[in-house]
Image (cartoon, coloured by chain):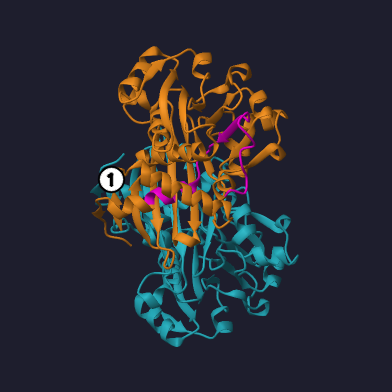
Chain colours: A cyan, B orange
């Protein structure tokens, strides 16, 4: 069994985006085994277990990932993850990967794949609501797909906005009001909000939105009125209904699973398409176990590993 | 993060039995978070993901375990397992354990705990149907609880019976017919059978049965008539109904969940009891994630570990 402590080193978003797009195509073909994530709740956070199997890639495993919002004060990331890869033929664990940074990257890449098919244009003004690590990952992944003219950042604190713009110094990155950040072509929301913060009237026609932040029951970033007029694309209908941007509106009766227009897999396969330049589109990302397998596979090809005795 | 490659070294069944009994008591008190196991199916086997959290022990984690029946021909165990232990406060993975042998031990210990409360006497003739590693684990764990006068072993092949008796050379261990092995005080079944092999007429009054082998949909070792006249104790009602000895009889309408007499946790707490010396009792073991956490905790106290950089 090999342990990859820093499997993200040397991975480029070009190859990650390609791997994530390919695995969404597999999902669109219905050629995956992926039971819903299982949640365990702690007093100060939770952890999720995400098993999956991709027969066409002969690839199987499980990611274990926590979410502990108080961690940064203790010097630890909010989200940490470990992926176990199993040999399909024997069930033996063949690799363990520190998947903390891989999780950021595979989520960024899903946003980039959504932009490839749903962005209203190839050269865009990018709005960011939220300025954490996932905001940065989205920008870096999307930059491989679209030409980013300008980045408008809203964050709860100006300090965080400036820190992100320093990280993204190759881009024209500026601070904006919440309404101002929404005046863009592609909007990316990455906050842990539990109430709608993006108002319907701020989002103009033709905007594509990557709704990334809502990934657990009770989380929500967008005014449900946006969902009502948008083409809503999810990564996985069961997960999205349970824990994605649409979970609260579904619980409230403001949205229904029948109003989901399709999955990112169907978009990649071309069986579902954006319906014109005035269409608002929303990609509701919850994060899929198959994304974790896909990025683990390419990371294992080049990554340095420790050998561990097992079984 | 620490990796324990051989955490079973130095563990005694005395301490394992005690830890497993304590965790069943926690289960009986309803003081655990343990969603049902999640199964992924491969062409030649499967793997199961088993997360759990024990608040009273401040202990959480997940076991990943496969079942690949063709493995022995490839020189690998049929069942291999890895347990990840998470820090409750931060969600950080703090330990990984090679849980292949721990899985055998914690299953043996559950059988021993069942015998402690359900065996008709303290000095017993032990019947074994099946002669694999789990048969041996059951004997070693039960020997800490009961005095074993004689062991009667049935296996598909005499070679396997003799191999087990050589392993158990401190015991009076002999080969028996299937009916002969059932002529005992405590019967332990550990086969991968998918049809009843233990007939009702072979099981005399007062016998206690540890039904260990059935741990997935479609598996079954006992004539359902035995369940109808027995006090049926399960480790967990949801798991047992899905994948334990009772799963096929429930699917066929020959048994119902209402006929479950109780859980091993309730037996340990004394809220359910054997109803006299003539009562046949069955312990239907599917294996619980909380058993894996309990044995991991004691293994981590004394085991030697590698330090791994994480996150």
Vertical side of B74 occupied by A192: above or below = below
Residue A293 is at least partly visible in this image: no
Residue found at x 43% / y 19%: B153
Q: In the shown orientation, is residue A124 left or right of residue B100?
A: right
Q: Is residue A186 magenta?
A: no
Q: Secondary structure at mark 1?
A: loop
- Relative image position of residue A147 (x, y in whole percent): 44, 68
Instruction: Decide which of A217, B180 is in the foreground and name it.
Output: B180
Vertical side of A150 occupied by B130: above or below = above
Instruction: Decide which of B150, A212 is in the foreground and name it.
Output: B150
Outermost residue on the right side: it is A253
- Relative image position of residue B51 (x, y in whole percent): 49, 51
- Relative image position of residue A236 (x, y in whole percent): 59, 53
Residue found at x 56% / y 35%: B283
Label 1 marks a residue whose chain is B
Residue found at x 58% / y 17%: B202
- The image quadrant that residue B130 belongs to is top left
Q: In the shown orientation, is residue B133 left or right of residue A27?
A: left
The residue stretch that appears in magenta: B270-296
Residue B170 is at least partly visible in this image: yes
The residue at which mark 1 appears reads as B5
- Relative image position of residue B152 (x, y in whole percent): 44, 19
**Mark 1: few/some/many CA within 10 Å (<14, 14-19, 20+):** many
């Amino acid at each position: 069994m090999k342990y990859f402590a820093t499997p993200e080193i040397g991975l480029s978003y070009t190859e990650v985006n390609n791997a994530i797009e390919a695995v969404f195509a597999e999902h669109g073909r219905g050629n995956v085994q992926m039971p819903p994530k299982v949640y365990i709740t702690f007093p100060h956070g939770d952890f999720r277990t995400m098993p999956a199997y991709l027969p066409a890639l002969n690839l199987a495993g499980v990611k274990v990932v926590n979410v502990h919002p108080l961690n940064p004060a203790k010097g630890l990331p909010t989200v940490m993850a470990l992926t176990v890869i199993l040999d399909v033929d024997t069930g033996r664990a063949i690799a363990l990967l520190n998947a903390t940074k891989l999780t950021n990257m595979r989520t960024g890449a899903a946003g980039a794949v959504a932009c490839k098919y749903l962005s209203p244009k190839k050269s865009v003004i990018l709005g960011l609501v939220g300025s954490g690590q996932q905001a940065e990952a989205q920008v870096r992944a999307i930059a491989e797909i679209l030409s980013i003219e300008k980045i408008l950042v809203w964050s709860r604190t100006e300090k965080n906005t400036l820190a992100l713009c320093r990280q993204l110094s190759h881009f024209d990155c500026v601070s904006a009001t919440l309404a101002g950040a929404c005046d863009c072509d592609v909007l990316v929301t990455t906050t842990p909000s539990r109430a709608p913060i993006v108002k319907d009237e701020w989002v103009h026609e033709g905007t594509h939105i990557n709704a990334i932040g809502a990934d657990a029951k009770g989380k929500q970033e967008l005014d449900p009125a946006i969902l009502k007029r948008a083409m809503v694309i999810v990564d996985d209908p069961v997960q999205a209904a349970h824990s994605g941007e649409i979970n609260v509106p579904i619980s409230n009766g403001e949205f229904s699973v029948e109003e989901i227009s399709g999955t990112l897999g169907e978009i990649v396969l071309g069986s579902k398409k954006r319906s014109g330049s005035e269409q608002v589109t929303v990609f509701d990302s919850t994060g899929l176990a198959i994304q974790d397998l896909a990025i683990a596979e390419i990371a294992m090809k080049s990554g340095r590993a420790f050998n561990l005795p097992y079984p």
